[in-house]
Image: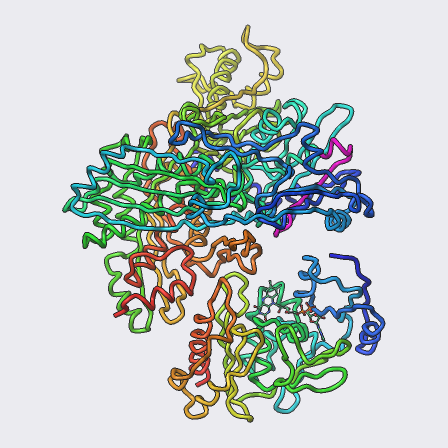
């Protein structure tokens, strides 16, 4: 057994530099002759731009340049793109309005980027920005998701009649209708999946430098995927050819999805630094982050379940309206379609599912992937509907789940909605979670709470998600413009230490530790002799980055494959040195040995020999440095049961989470401590959505939750200490046996919390966020006996 | 922030003189309200007069049956003061629950009261305990100090020097926090004082106020049950995305009941 290998809770390598303040974030980087940029943003949700006068701003102290959409268009830069096509019910691709990086004649949400002011100092840029004189022709705004496509609504984009991006039906409508017609019981639920602001701790930033000598642009960005940024900026936005553009994502302070996308500010900074021939830095302030980071969720849906007399699910029907905001962000179309509808089977054998997703434009910030991306929306809907169905059938929520679970012997299981689940044991997780949560004695706790005037409730959520995103062929068929494999390079230095180059990107996940554990396990090199390098297109090979809980399940496997190549090559080198046949060489714990003898050679010696090949196998290339790519055959399917127990104060509506149990199946755990941290963070994210976070625009399109004064983020005292355990199964298609854990909590938690509150008050439903006032109102109307 | 001139004085007189010379000057104490406002470019004072160097404005002293707290005393210092904890434990607890540690280590009682944010905590204590606000010019009774939303009886060149709190027989403050900002959606301070039972309500209306009807009811019988029948008019309540007027009116009663229970 190797020290610090797979399964060890090794402390995170990266934490030292973060804890002593030596992290290196984009805004920490300052270069000679740097200028500062400030974006002039639209104060209106919807308006035409009649004129822009930059004269006074240009004359303002310290100003280097003021650039607008006209300058951008003249240079042929942009527009921004959406990389996934969804075919609408009319057979046409989704409607894709032009998304200029600086407005051209029209603005479509508050915060829309209109001009960039570049000055010697940030204060001077801000002063000058106030002097950019823009004559707006204000138009009525569309902000409400549910009514955005209604007759008579203000039209936002000419190419998108009725503000529709796509209407995407999926499944066998007639068969579902027939099943509903003959069902014993039909349960129905209307719900809203509340809009969230993603809120990474580090705001977005960009630093652009142009080297006139080499004609190369270097862009430091807050990115989760530097190579994807470079590809899109080069191939689609016309910023610079790929080989003349370097994108660096240095330390990045959280992303949660919001830093996947290619944003206007990034493209404009890259372009502007070449135009003004000075480095240009922009760092978002928190207000800009609220206004202009891509938001998440924002669905309005109706779900129906048809059941037989035993509560067996016969068919499900889901009608969803999803808000994509004012323009399409980089992966916007994929989130409410493929990442959502393909998860509607949940953990159940429901044989027939029909869904329709209407995606609409509104005068709000673009909406795209946010931790879980589509799967939280699907899971919330399914797991809430299942609780309603249980109540309608007079069954315990655990019992109706058991009756409909995909049984453990049915894997691989082909769902009616594309996904084929490779592995899982849903009852095992449920049983374990119920035991840990002391589910069976809940009623005694509820009775005791009543004596104190409180109402207790317990809620289950049995989720499954698809991550390790994933098979290129699958996403290609679905209309993605990229492949979703991952790459790795494992390089020995002559002295025997190792540099691992990964195409994944860490913005808090701890790759530098977890990936080093993989290598120490496989190659037997001491953990401290391994360095993981990521985030710089000039250092690492092309890679797809980190999102969709894919880094270990896809990127980790690429590392393992590169290690296998090193072992194979090492065997040749060792065989030559040890004067044995290659077939007789065995490799274990860092040593190549001749089977049945005590002749052995450490991998560090093999590496040295490869770089100093004085005595070396004939025809073998020198060097000990291998790369590998991995394209998985399937998504991975983490699953589990979360149980939330709440105590509601009916007099104030305050909800306290008194106990939270999570039993997850992530396959094999490489670093259990890091995994538990991801689970905690995910649950808190989900609790935030369920109880606190609600992004709100008013009818004029002003964001009324544009600061932490009004947008409630979860804090430590909003959650209890969690009870976390695992019920793993082995995913057969993943060589490391891992499934991914970064989003599970955010997917599992919201329905567990809302199911618990509904249970406490004996009500059918309460929308998220279940704020004190909303809970108080629900308690008023509920017959609390 | 816009540009401004910065002054720091070691005395009250020096600070007032700097203020009188300034075109549109502002005192700055802990800066916890002032600086965010300036950073958001919502305030553009010509001059900032920093009170941070005036030693005489800092400190807590017991004067007979009262506690005198210097205007520049931080929330953290009030929360940690043994004298405050002994004489008016409610006040120490209130101060210890304002904002977060960073805010409590910078923010001051003078700044909080001068600012008179409708959702701030200290104003409820000043009113309910019948405190006296001392300035460089005069003494102002708590009842006369808070005049409207973000408005006080202070003149432009008037500086709070300290606040004097008489020790109550019993007092309790119940705060229903805004889940986002954690300011008070409704905060009710109930005190039994030499002047009778006093109830002050913050957060609920544009300016902190005495809950006179609640006081009347509690004079009859000091129990939470006595509050139940009191009419808290909704039409004067604040309303925002966190709490409607109806909910706030309800919370005023609930917080009063809980404060009364905590007093007895
Ligand atoms: C994140 C955060 C959370 C907060 N949470 C709460 C909360 O829960 N409850 C709460 O009550 N408050 C809260 N606050 C406000 C905090 O208590 C501030 O400290 C207070 O409002 C202002 O005090 P200050 O010393 O920082 O004053 P400053 O910001 O420096 O000044 C505020 C105003 O008072 C004036 N002023 C200051 N001192 C004097 C004086 N001696 N005489 C005359 N005028 C003066 C200034 O000119 C200015 O107009 C919070 C603040 C922040 C940033």
Q: Which residue is drawn at 43% across and 78% down?
A: B253
Q: Position of residue B260 (x, y in %)?
A: 44, 83
Q: Which residue lies furthest to the front in this view?
A: A152
Q: Residue furthest top?
A: A618
- Residue B68 included in the magenta stretch of the image: no
Q: Is residue A598 left or right of residue A424?
A: right
- Residue in the foreground of this view, choosing between A588 and A184: A184
Let me know if residue A25 appears in the view.
Answer: no
- Residue in the foreground of this view, choosing between A352 and A421: A352
Q: Quick check: A383 above or below A565?
A: below
Q: In which quarter of the image is the N terminus of chain A?
A: top left
Q: Is residue A197 left or right of residue A454?
A: right
Q: Is residue A437 left or right of residue A26?
A: left
Q: Where is residue A633 in the image (x, y as percent from the top left)?
A: 38, 25
Q: Where is residue B26 in the image (x, y as percent from the top left)?
A: 75, 69
Q: In which quarter of the image is the C terminus of chain A?
A: bottom left
Please give the range of residues in magenta.
Answer: A272-287
């Amino acid at each position: 057994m190797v020290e610090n290998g797979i399964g060890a809770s090794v402390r995170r390598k990266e934490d030292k530099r973060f804890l002593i303040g030596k992290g290196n974030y984009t805004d920490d980087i300052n270069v000679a002759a740097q200028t500062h940029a400030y974006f002039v943003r639209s104060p209106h949700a919807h308006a035409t731009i009649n004129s822009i006068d930059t004269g006074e701003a240009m004359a303002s102290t310290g100003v280097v340049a003021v650039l607008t959409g006209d300058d951008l268009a003249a240079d042929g830069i942009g527009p921004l793109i959406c990389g996934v096509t969804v075919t609408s019910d009319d057979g046409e691709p989704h409607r894709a309005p032009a998304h200029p990086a600086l407005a051209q004649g029209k603005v479509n949400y508050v915060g829309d980027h209109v001009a960039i002011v570049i000055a010697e100092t940030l204060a001077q840029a801000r002063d000058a920005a106030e002097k950019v004189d823009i004559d707006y022709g204000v138009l009525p705004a569309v902000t409400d998701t549910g009514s955005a496509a209604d007759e008579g609504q203000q039209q936002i984009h000419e190419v998108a009649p009725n503000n529709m991006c796509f209407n995407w039906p999926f499944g066998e409508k007639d068969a579902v209708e027939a099943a509903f017609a003959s069902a014993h019981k039909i349960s129905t639920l209307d719900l809203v999946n509340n809009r969230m602001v993603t809120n990474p701790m580090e705001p977005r930033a960009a630093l652009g430098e142009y080297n006139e000598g080499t004609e190369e642009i270097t862009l430091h960005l807050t990115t989760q995927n530097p190579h994807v940024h470079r590809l899109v900026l080069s191939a689609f936005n016309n910023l610079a050819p790929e080989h003349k553009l370097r994108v660096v994502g240095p330390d990045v302070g959280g992303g949660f999805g919001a830093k996947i996308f290619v944003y206007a500010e990034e493209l404009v900074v890259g372009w502007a630094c070449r135009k003004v021939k000075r480095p240009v830095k922009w760092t978002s302030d928190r207000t800009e982050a609220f206004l202009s980071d891509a938001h998440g969720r924002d669905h309005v849906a109706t779900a129906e379940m048809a059941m037989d007399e035993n509560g067996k699910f016969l068919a499900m029907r889901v009608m969803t309206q999803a808000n994509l905001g004012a323009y399409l962000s980089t992966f916007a179309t994929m989130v409410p379609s493929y990442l959502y509808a393909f998860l509607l089977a949940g953990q159940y054998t429901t044989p027939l599912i029909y869904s329709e997703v209407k995606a609409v434009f509104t005068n709000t910030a673009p909406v795209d992937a946010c931790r879980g991306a589509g799967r939280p929306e699907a899971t919330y809907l399914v797991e809430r509907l299942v609780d309603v169905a249980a109540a309608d059938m007079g069954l315990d929520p655990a019992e109706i789940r058991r009756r409909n679970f995909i049984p453990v012997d049915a894997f691989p299981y082909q769902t009616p909605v594309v996904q084929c689940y490779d592995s899982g044991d849903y009852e095992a997780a449920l049983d374990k979670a119920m035991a840990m949560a002391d589910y069976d004695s809940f009623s005694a706790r509820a009775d005791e709470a009543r004596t104190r005037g409180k109402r207790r409730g317990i809620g289950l959520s049995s989720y499954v998600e698809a991550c390790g995103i994933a098979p290129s062929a699958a996403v290609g068929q679905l209309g993605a413009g990229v492949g979703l494999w991952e790459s790795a390079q494992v390089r020995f230095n002559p002295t025997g230490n190792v540099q691992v180059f990964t195409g994944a990107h860490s913005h808090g996940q701890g790759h530098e530790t977890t990936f080093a554990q993989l290598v120490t396990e496989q190659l037997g090199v001491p953990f401290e002799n391994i360095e993981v390098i990521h985030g710089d297109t000039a250092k690492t090979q092309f890679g797809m980055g980190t999102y969709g809980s894919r880094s270990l399940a896809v990127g980790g496997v690429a590392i393992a494959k590169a290690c296998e190549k090193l072992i194979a090559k090492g065997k040749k080198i060792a065989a030559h040195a040890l004067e044995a046949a290659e077939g007789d060489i065995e490799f274990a714990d860092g040593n190549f040995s001749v089977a049945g003898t005590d002749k052995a050679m450490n991998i560090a010696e093999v590496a040295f020999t490869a770089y100093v090949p004085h005595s070396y196998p004939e025809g073998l290339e020198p060097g000990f440095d291998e790369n590998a790519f991995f394209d998985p055959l399937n998504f991975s399917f983490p699953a589990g049961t979360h149980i939330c127990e709440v105590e509601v104060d009916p007099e104030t509506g305050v909800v306290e989470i008194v106990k939270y149990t999570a039993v997850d199946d992530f396959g094999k755990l490489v670093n259990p401590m890091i995994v538990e941290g991801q689970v905690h963070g995910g649950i808190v994210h989900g609790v935030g959505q369920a109880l606190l976070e609600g992004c709100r625009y008013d009818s004029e399109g002003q964001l009324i939750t544009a600061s932490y004064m009004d947008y409630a983020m979860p804090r430590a005292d909003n959650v209890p200490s969690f009870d976390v355990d695992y019920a793993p199964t082995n995913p057969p298609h993943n060589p490391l046996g891992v499934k991914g854990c970064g989003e599970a909590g955010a997917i599992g938690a919201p329905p567990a919390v809302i199911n618990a509150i509904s249970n406490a008050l004996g009500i059918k439903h309460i929308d998220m966020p279940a704020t004190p006032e909303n809970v108080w109102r629900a308690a008023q109307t509920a017959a609390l006996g | 922030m816009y540009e401004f001139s910065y002054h720091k004085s070691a005395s009250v007189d020096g600070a007032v003189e700097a203020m009188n010379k300034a075109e549109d000057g502002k005192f700055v104490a802990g800066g916890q309200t002032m600086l965010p406002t300036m950073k958001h470019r919502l305030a553009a004072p010509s001059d900032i007069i920093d009170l941070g160097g005036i030693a005489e404005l800092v400190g807590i002293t017991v004067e007979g049956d009262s506690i005198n707290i210097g205007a520049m005393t931080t929330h953290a210092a009030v929360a940690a003061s043994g004298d405050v904890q002994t004489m008016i434990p409610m006040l120490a607890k209130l101060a210890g629950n304002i904002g977060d540690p960073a805010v409590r280590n910078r923010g001051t009682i003078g700044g909080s009261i001068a600012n008179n944010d409708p959702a701030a905590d200290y104003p409820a204590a000043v009113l309910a305990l019948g405190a006296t606000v001392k300035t460089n010019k005069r003494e102002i009774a708590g009842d006369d100090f808070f005049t409207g939303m973000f408005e006080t009886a202070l003149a432009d060149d008037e500086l709070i020097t300290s606040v004097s709190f008489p020790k109550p027989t019993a007092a309790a403050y119940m705060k229903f926090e805004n889940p986002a900002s954690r300011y008070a959606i409704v905060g009710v301070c109930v005190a039994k004082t030499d002047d009778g039972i006093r109830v002050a309500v913050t957060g609920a209306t544009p300016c902190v106020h005495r809950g006179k009807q609640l006081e009347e009811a509690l004079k009859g019988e000091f129990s939470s049950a006595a509050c139940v029948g009191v009419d808290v008019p909704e039409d004067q309540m604040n309303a925002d995305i966190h709490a409607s007027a109806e909910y706030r009116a309800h919370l005023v009663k609930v917080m009063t009941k809980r404060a009364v229970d905590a007093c007895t």
